[in-house]
Image (cartoon, grey):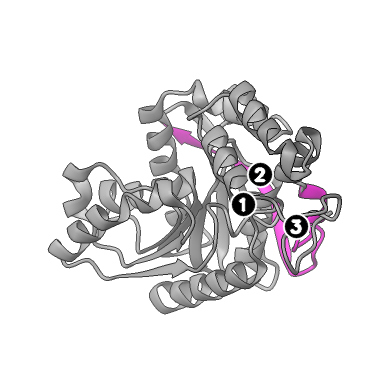
């Protein structure tokens, strides 16, 4: 369980050192392997930490992080399939709509991290629907059987997939939900980490499809297609996320040069993944503010 006031797991006697968060980020993104990650954590033993305790604290705890139940009477969730001819063929996603919806509503594509459609991202889709939008969260791992039930296996599975086909799957998903019978014809996208990259990619690759984008700590699309971006962007970054933040100055330069409407928020003392309430990187105050800004942004540009 996590103490929501200081983000320190109650089983640890001291706050988690920043280097442990940094190593976890490297491990989660394939920069170092698990063995190296564990070896580095073991070096903190002199400071009173056990490797097993840190591992347990850094891993996601989805059971205690749910904000909107799938049984919530305000939403209705189901899985639907869609076709991705230039990607992996048959794909699937988590479709969530407000139960009060009569007619059509703006749609929001919710894009997961680099490990498939885990419980946190499904919960985010339900939050989007609670705010009055039709949410659609694809599972990139559907061609391999779907999210396997844990992030380590999901990350390993997604790493084996063809990146170009993965991007085509999300392009197909964006077009599918924008053309859905429940759609008003307006599409937003919000994504986290890998999903943040996908939002930036969609803005550049299919500018006629995306009407508003909110990438959370995502790297930009390849430079040669950034000139195509038309949709307004709300960029959400954590101050301590050195890896992603290193890409921001060049991206901002291109956005300015191409006259893109954008706002960037840098959240003080926030780590990569600060919105993810299933891990100790979660920053409740900053996450809530970022989410309020996200919903306001979508209401401004989609409704």
**Along the polypeptide, which appears first: circle 1 or circle 3?**
3
Please say if 203 is above or below 86: below
Q: Mark 2 sits on what residue?
A: 79
Residue 201 visible here: yes
Residue 73 inside the magenta-drawn segment? yes
Which mark is first along the chain, 2 or 1? 2
Q: Are marks 1 and 2 in contact (CB under 8 Å)?
A: yes
Residue projecting furthest to the left: 257
Frontmost of labels 1 and 3 is 3
How far apart are labels 1 and 2 at the CA level?
6 Å
Residue underneath mark 3? 8
Find the distance from the CA under tag 1 to the CA under tag 3: 34 Å
Residue at disc 1, secondary structure:
strand
- Residue 130, position in %: x, y? 66, 69
Determine if the magenta segment contains residue 291.
Answer: no
Residue stretch rendered in magenta on the structure: 62-84
């Amino acid at each position: 369980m996590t103490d929501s006031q200081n983000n320190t797991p109650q089983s640890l006697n001291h706050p988690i050192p920043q280097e442990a968060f940094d190593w976890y980020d490297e491990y989660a993104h394939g920069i170092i392997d698990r063995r190296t990650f564990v070896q580095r954590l073991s070096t903190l033993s002199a400071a009173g930490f056990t490797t097993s305790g840190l591992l347990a604290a850094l891993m996601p705890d989805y059971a205690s992080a749910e904000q909107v139940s799938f049984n919530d009477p305000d939403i209705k969730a189901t899985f639907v399939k869609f076709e991705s001819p230039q990607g992996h063929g048959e794909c699937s996603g988590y479709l969530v709509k407000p139960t009060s919806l009569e007619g059509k509503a703006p749609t929001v594509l919710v894009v997961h991290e680099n490990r498939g459609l885990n419980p946190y991202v499904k919960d985010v889709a339900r939050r989007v629907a609670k705010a009055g939008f039709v949410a659609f969260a694809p599972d990139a791992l559907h061609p391999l059987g779907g999210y396997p039930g844990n992030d380590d296996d999901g990350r390993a599975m997604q790493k084996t997939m063809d990146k170009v086909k993965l991007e085509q799957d999300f392009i197909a998903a964006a077009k599918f939900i924008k053309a859905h019978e429940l759609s008003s014809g307006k599409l937003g996208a919000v994504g986290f980490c890998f999903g943040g990259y996908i939002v930036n990619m969609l803005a550049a690759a299919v500018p006629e499809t995306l009407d508003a984008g909110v990438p959370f700590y995502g790297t930009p699309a390849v430079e040669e297609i950034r000139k195509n971006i038309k949709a307004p962007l709300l960029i959400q970054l954590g101050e301590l996320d050195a890896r992603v933040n290193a890409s921001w100055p060049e991206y901002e330069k291109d956005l300015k040069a191409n006259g893109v409407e954008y706002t960037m928020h840098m959240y003080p003392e926030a780590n990569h993944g600060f919105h993810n309430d299933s891990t100790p990187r979660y920053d409740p105050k900053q996450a809530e503010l970022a989410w309020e800004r996200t919903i306001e942004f979508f209401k401004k540009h989609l409704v």
